[in-house]
Image: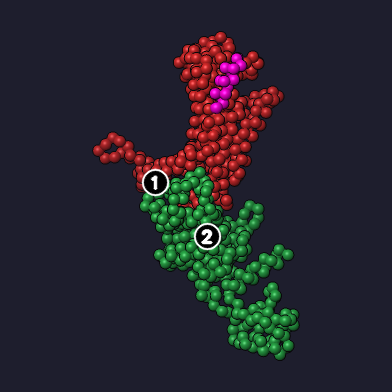
């Protein structure tokens, strides 16, 4: 029989009840996390840059809708199934969120994601508030986690804004009709809404590697511009490399290669494989960059 | 009683990646109730030392104990320390009050507290406390920074150059506040590059140069007149030559327009003018030199020589 005391369980059952109550250490952790999340949100929400970015994300689908309403359907040859929604955008309002995602994901949403993630630490550094905060018993890991969570939340909101504003503007301009893909496959309004939701969620996931790279750089540099530009730069480099056919299958490991793979949802039957590979590609990048951010931030000297 | 000391630092070393040794084997003890001044030139290692005390910078070697507890980043004992490092930073798009509230909450104290009301009173910013930080003057920010450092009534305050950038009236207010806080029993460790500030405000001081303590003690000890004289004479070279031969003169060195003569403890100061008079050398100034001033001015001189 072991003489070692058994470790206390992280959760214990309250007496006389089937409800599980957290262990005091878990409660402390949760309480600190909630405080940090609340303060981070309270810092980020009133910032003009947050609202300007989100307003711009709302403006782009409206602009695209107006452009299509005035100019009609595009005729240029496109390079992906997702891009094909630009060809049929005026057939139904439900095409417009897809066309908006298609138009914004490769650059504007990348900029938004890099901004929200890249400013996580550098903004506090430039305000001079990081040193005062970290001179209190604040866990650097929890502080970074709270900033990453709120940054990710804002990226989610940015993607949703693109889709929702695209949907509203599209329905107003072109009506609530089933969509017909360029391959002449028809999807009902309900099925299309679900696919729009999946495409939006997938777009959020496809930005994870770029955002986590910006987060990592924000722990290394004191320059906000540098941290934000790093995510954009990574996307540009990835796009350039993706355009070199000689790289063959190596291109599939690039962080932006599968960014528009949600277009495969609109063939019959839907092809889920590119999206699943896209998620699988995002995962290691995101984990590596987040771990690097944590490793660096918990060890760095706070000098500014 | 090592455990009870608010600050105890031994063998502290910090070398940055660029090879600069900012702090080089620093030893320091601050006892309860002291107003301790860390006096040094810019770049002497004051701010780096204070940042290490707050867990912001990791030392290469050495021990830092605050109230007997080792300091690491985010150490629980930091709850007992209020600090103002460099110019106080705030979130520009929030009001002064919101800044205090968010800082208080992020530091793990909860959302609302009477401590915030006390800090608001202390900051004495009037209606400006509800205005965005963007419109604050430097003095207002500094007052708010000190108020933030005092949130939660910490028994130890670490203030890095607390009067830098303030106008004379604000300087007087801050110095008066430091005195009041010390009278309440708080221990205060402040850094400064101003000799007169340390002399006016502190009960104890240490002179830091090139990351080392070169003089330290109570202000009474440090400013007690030593047997060292500053002389201004008509012919410094001749005076040096004559005084070097005199019994009881330990050393002589040039300083600006004059010379500093270190006398043996038994040597009467009045002997010096007599020796100079005998050698037909006119003396226009003879002033006793204090230890703190000596250490600080010696360091300034060394710095100037290094720049040339």
Identify which residue, A52 or B45, lies in the foreground: A52
Residue occupying the point 48% across, 39% down = A46
Pick out the residue farthest to the front: B127
Q: Is residue A141 visible?
A: no
Q: Which residues are magenta?
A: A59-73
User: Could you say which disc has been placed on residue B308 in the image?
Assistant: none
Residue at numbered disc 1: B111
How far across and how far down the image is residue A229, in percent?
62, 37
How far across and how far down the image is residue A91, in percent?
54, 13
- Is residue B15 toward the left or the right of residue A33 in the image? right
Residue occupying the point 50% across, 17% down = A171
- What is the quadrant of residue B242 in the picture? bottom right
- What secondary structure is found at the residue carrying circle 2? loop
Say above or below: A89 vs A11. above
- Is residue A50 toward the left or the right of residue B152 in the image? right
Q: CA distance from mark 1 to mark 2?
A: 28 Å
Q: Earlier in the sequence, mark 1 or mark 2?
A: 1
Q: Is residue A62 visible?
A: yes
Say above or below: A158 vs B127. above
Say above or below: A163 vs B156. above
The chain drawn in green is B
Would you call the spot at circle 2 few (<14 residues within 10 Å), some (14-19), or many (20 or more)? many
Residue A143 part of the magenta-drawn span: no
Residue occupying the point 51% across, 24% down = A165
- Is residue B235 toward the left or the right of residue A185 in the image? right
The chain drawn in red is A
How far across and how far down the image is residue B241, in percent?
73, 83
Q: Which quarter shows the C terminus of chain B?
A: bottom right
- Tell me the chain of label 1: B
User: Could you say which disc has been placed on residue B162 in the image?
Assistant: 2
């Amino acid at each position: 029989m072991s003489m070692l005391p058994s470790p206390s369980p992280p959760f214990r059952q309250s007496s006389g009840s089937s409800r599980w109550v957290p262990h005091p250490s878990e409660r402390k952790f949760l309480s600190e996390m909630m405080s940090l999340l609340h303060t981070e949100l309270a810092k980020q929400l009133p910032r003009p840059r947050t609202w300007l970015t989100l307003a711009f994300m709302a403006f782009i689908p409206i602009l695209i809708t107006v452009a299509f309403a005035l100019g009609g359907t595009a005729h240029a040859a496109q390079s992906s199934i997702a891009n094909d929604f630009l060809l049929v955008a005026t057939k139904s309002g439900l095409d417009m969120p897809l066309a908006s995602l298609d138009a914004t994901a490769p650059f504007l949403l990348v900029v938004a994601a890099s901004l929200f993630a890249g400013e996580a630490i550098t903004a506090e550094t430039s305000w001079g508030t990081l040193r005062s905060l970290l001179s209190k018993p604040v866990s650097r890991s929890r502080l970074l986690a709270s900033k990453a969570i709120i940054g990710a939340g804002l990226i989610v909101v940015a993607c949703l804004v693109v889709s929702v504003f695209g949907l509203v503007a599209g329905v107003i301009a072109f009506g609530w009709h089933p969509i017909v893909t360029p391959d002449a496959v028809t999807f009902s309004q309900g099925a299309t809404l679900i696919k729009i939701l999946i495409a939006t969620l997938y777009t959020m996931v496809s930005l994870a590697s770029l955002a986590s790279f910006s987060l990592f750089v924000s722990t290394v540099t004191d320059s906000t511009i540098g941290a934000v530009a790093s995510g954009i730069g990574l996307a540009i480099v990835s796009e350039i490399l993706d355009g070199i056919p000689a790289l063959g299958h190596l291109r599939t490991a690039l962080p932006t290669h599968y960014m528009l793979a949600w277009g495969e949802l609109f063939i019959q039957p839907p092809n889920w494989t590119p999206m699943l590979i896209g998620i699988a590609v995002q995962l290691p990048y995101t984990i590596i960059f987040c771990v690097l951010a944590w490793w660096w931030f918990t060890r760095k000297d706070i000098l500014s | 009683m090592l455990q009870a000391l608010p600050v105890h630092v031994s063998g502290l070393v910090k070398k940055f990646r660029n090879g600069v040794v900012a702090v080089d084997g620093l030893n320091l003890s601050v006892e309860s109730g002291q107003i301790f001044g860390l006096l040094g030139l810019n770049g002497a290692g004051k701010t780096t030392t204070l940042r290490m005390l707050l867990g912001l910078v990791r030392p290469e070697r050495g021990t830092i104990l605050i109230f007997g507890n080792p300091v690491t980043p985010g150490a629980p004992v930091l709850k007992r320390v209020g600090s103002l490092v460099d110019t106080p930073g705030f979130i520009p798009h929030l009001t002064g009050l919101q800044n205090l509230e968010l800082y208080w909450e992020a530091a793990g104290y909860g959302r609302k507290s009477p401590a915030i009301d006390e800090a608001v009173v202390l900051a004495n910013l009037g209606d400006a406390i509800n205005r965005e930080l963007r419109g604050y003057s430097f003095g207002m920010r500094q007052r708010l920074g000190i108020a933030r450092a005092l949130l939660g009534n910490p028994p130890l305050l670490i203030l890095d150059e607390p009067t830098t950038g303030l106008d004379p009236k604000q300087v007087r207010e801050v110095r008066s506040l430091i005195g009041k806080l010390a009278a309440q029993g708080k221990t205060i460790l402040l850094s400064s590059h101003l000799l007169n500030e340390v002399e006016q405000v502190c009960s104890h001081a240490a002179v830091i140069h090139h990351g080392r303590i070169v003089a330290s003690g109570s202000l009474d000890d440090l400013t007690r007149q030593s047997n060292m004289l500053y002389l201004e004479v008509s012919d410094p070279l001749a005076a040096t030559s004559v005084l070097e031969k005199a019994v009881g003169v330990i050393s002589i060195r040039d300083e600006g327009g004059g010379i500093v003569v270190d006398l043996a403890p038994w040597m009467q100061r009045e002997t010096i003018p007599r020796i100079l008079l005998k050698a037909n050398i006119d003396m226009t100034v003879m002033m006793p030199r204090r230890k703190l001033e000596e250490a600080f001015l010696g360091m300034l001189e060394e710095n100037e020589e290094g720049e040339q």
